[in-house]
Image: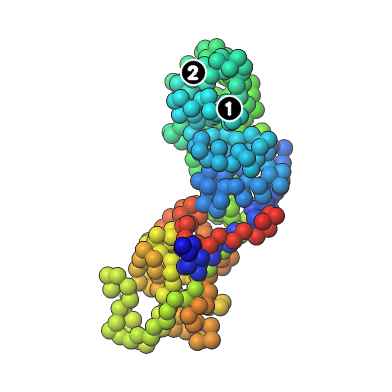
Amino acid sequence: MQDPAHATGTILTIDLDAVAANYRLLSETAAGAECAGVVKADGYGLGAIPVVRALAAAGCRTFFVAHLGEALAIRDAAPEATIAVLNGAAPGAEAEFAEHRLLPVLNSLQAIAAWAAQGTEDGTRLPAILHIDTGMSRLGLSDTELDRVADDPALLDGIEIKWLMSHLAVAEEPAHPLNAEQHARFEAARARLPSAPTSLANSSGIFLGPDYRYDLVRPGAALYGVNPQPSAANAMKHVVRLEAPILQLRSIDSPRTVGYGATHRVTGVSKIATIPVGYADGYLRSLSGRGHAFLGGHKVPLVGRVSMDLITLDVTGVPDTVAHPGAMVELICERYTVDAIGADAGTMGYEILTSLGARYARRYVGGGA
């Protein structure tokens, strides 16, 4: 059976050297702090195993994922690395965490008790990360739970606290007052807990300055080219390129319309290119009538609705020598980045990356690929 990824003719190119260069830049910016790599969601949609190998070659020794399955998937690619699981250990999974030397992020009193019990059963102090909620209001110890742990340090007996951590909610907005509030709450919390290395900064948090970097920084999206400082030029290298061929060209004139719902009506003779990418491939439907692409250096608008498997581009002004069946169109490139596509889609670069579909033929370059 033919691989559907190759049958579509679409190519997703992932530059592992760019990922490594972004890691080195972030590590240099956070000088004095260890730089981890967040590779959850299958390396933000780009393939966790090749990304982990590229980051490890660049010097990364600590990785963060969201779930146990993600950690197990990369263990062989980073056999000596520290692998932390942000969502912690589900009840009953503690033994598997210990067996594979995985570091749970302890987000509740129940998680603390279960991990301490596992250490008692194993006859050792098991390492973990203690998460303090300072303003995200998702995971981590609440104020009440923090009071319990601070008032009764014996709750942590049998646990080696490798890091105390919290997570910033609006680090991409440097002037937002919640950044300083979270920093102050984190400082107050760590003063009440056993001494341990600390971690607060995500990708954007690294750029808030040295007060936010502590001992460990945890960049994620910036590794993959997303701009960690939306108000400034992007210092990150571009990582992904998505190309797809023109399936068919069609010349139409008014009063013809294009696509489902007849949302686009041509006003004169137009040349429409159909491309084999749609929302089933993670090319978001909200790009309908808003996105664009590049064909031989020409910017061409997306017209009509994004459907499950197809989009249509208006290539009226592109010469026939460039616009022809089989010609490759750039859907993601340095001129139309994941951040720009995210803005056009009413979302963010993170969602664009993690939505990239399975039908693309993936091509890795650099990083020993």
Query: Residue 277 at what x, y percent from top left?
Result: 43, 66
In the rendered view, would you say 120 is above or below 258?
above
Q: Is residue 311 visible?
A: yes
Residue nearest the observer in this picture, 155 or 348: 155
* Image position, residue 102 (x, y; %): 58, 31
Q: Is residue 207 above or below residue 251?
A: above
Residue at the image point whose x is 33% and y is 81% from the top:
266
At a point 59% along the width and 41% down the height, the residue shown is 74
Q: Residue at x 57, y 34 (%)?
A: 84
The quadrant of the rendering that contains the C terminus is: bottom right
| Residue denoted by label 1 | 99
Compute the Cα span from label 1 to label 2.
18 Å
| Amino acid type indicated by mark 1 | Glu
Report whether 347 appears left or right of 51.
left
Above-or-below relation of 285 to 174: below
Give the quadrant of residue 138.
top left
Element on which disc 1 rests: helix
Residue receiving disc 2: 113
Residue 135 visible here: no
On screen, residue 355 versus residue 191, left or right, reads: left
- 1 or 2: tag closer to the N-terminus: 1
Q: Residue at x 49, y 18 (%)?
A: 113
Tell which of 100 and 106 is nearer to you.
100
